Image (cartoon, rainbow, N blue to C red):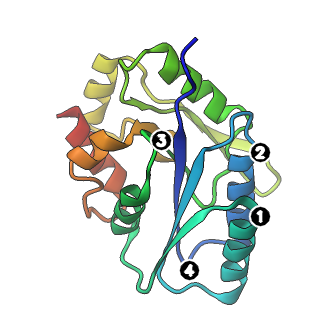
Amino acid sequence: MSAALAFTVLMAVYDGDDADFFREAVASAYANDRRPDDFVLVVDGPVRDALQAQIVSCAQTYGMRIIWSPHNQGLAKALNAGLEAVQTEWVARADADDINLPDRFAKQMAFIEACHGAVDLVGGAIEEIDENERVVATRVMPTAVADIQRFARRRNPFNHMTVVYRAALVRQAGGYPALHLREDYGLWARLLM
């Protein structure tokens, strides 16, 4: 059996994020069956005191690496700054308001390892929940390459907060383009080309 591949969780947070959701999102990454080898958090501009307190607490608890941006520059620039700080071959994206299932990283990294380098990006489905934690929607994406390419002509083919990708490939593609609210879709288009 080959050695386990190392991966970094990459997350950005800004003043509009909820402090409690942020804490839960970070905790869910570290509660995974396969813990991240590293965690890069980009704080995109000044944040209110409650969120800053959670950021500092999580950094102390988990040993996350933090990049503090003095000004809010948007998600694309924040993620690109974080991507430059990633030292592992693989990046697992996570959002500051989403909960990772406890087996997410174990399943995704086992799949990547089983492919022996034949895959560059893996994503997953998401469940959207309401305030009572009831599932209100499920978003399942295509899985075959031809289906992904066809789907991408009209809609975003990956749930961004679920992807694990090869860091060098995303850097080579120029990182996240500055397309407001479509940063990830722009990146997937670059990668598909």
Q: Earlier in the sequence, mark 3 or mark 1?
A: 1
For the residues bearing labels 4 and 1, Cβ distance under 8 angstroms? no
Q: Earlier in the sequence, mark 1 or mark 2?
A: 2
On the rendered image, what quadrant is the N terminus found in?
Answer: top right
Q: Which residue is mark 1?
A: 61
For the residues bearing labels 1 and 2, Cβ distance under 8 angstroms? no
Q: Earlier in the sequence, mark 3 or mark 4?
A: 4
Q: Nearer the viewer, mark 3 or mark 2?
A: 2
**Crowd tier of the residue under label 1, counting other residues whose Cα lies within 10 Å: few below 14, some 14–19, many 20 or above:** few
> Disc 4 and disc 1: Cα gap in Å?
21 Å
Q: Looking at numbered disc 4 in the image, what kind of residue is underneath it?
A: Asp
Q: Which residue is mark 2?
A: 31
For the residues bearing labels 3 and 2, Cβ distance under 8 angstroms? no
In the image as oriented, which residue stretches furthest toward the top? Answer: 1
Q: Which residue is mark 4?
A: 15
Q: Position of residue 63 (x, y in %)?
A: 68, 61
Q: Looking at numbered disc 2 in the image, what kind of residue is underneath it?
A: Ala
Label for residue 34?
Answer: none
**Residue at 36% over, 58% down:** 84
> Disc 3 and disc 2: Cα gap in Å?
21 Å
Q: Is residue 47 left or right of residue 145?
A: right
Q: Looking at numbered disc 1 in the image, what kind of residue is underneath it?
A: Thr
Residue in front for this viewpoint, 160 or 109: 109
Q: Which residue is mark 3?
A: 159
For the residues bearing labels 3 and 4, Cβ distance under 8 angstroms? no
On the rendered image, what quadrant is the C terminus found in?
Answer: top left
> Disc 1 and disc 2: Cα gap in Å?
13 Å
Q: Nearer the viewer, mark 4 or mark 1?
A: 1
Kindly state the secondary structure of the residue where label 4 is placed: loop
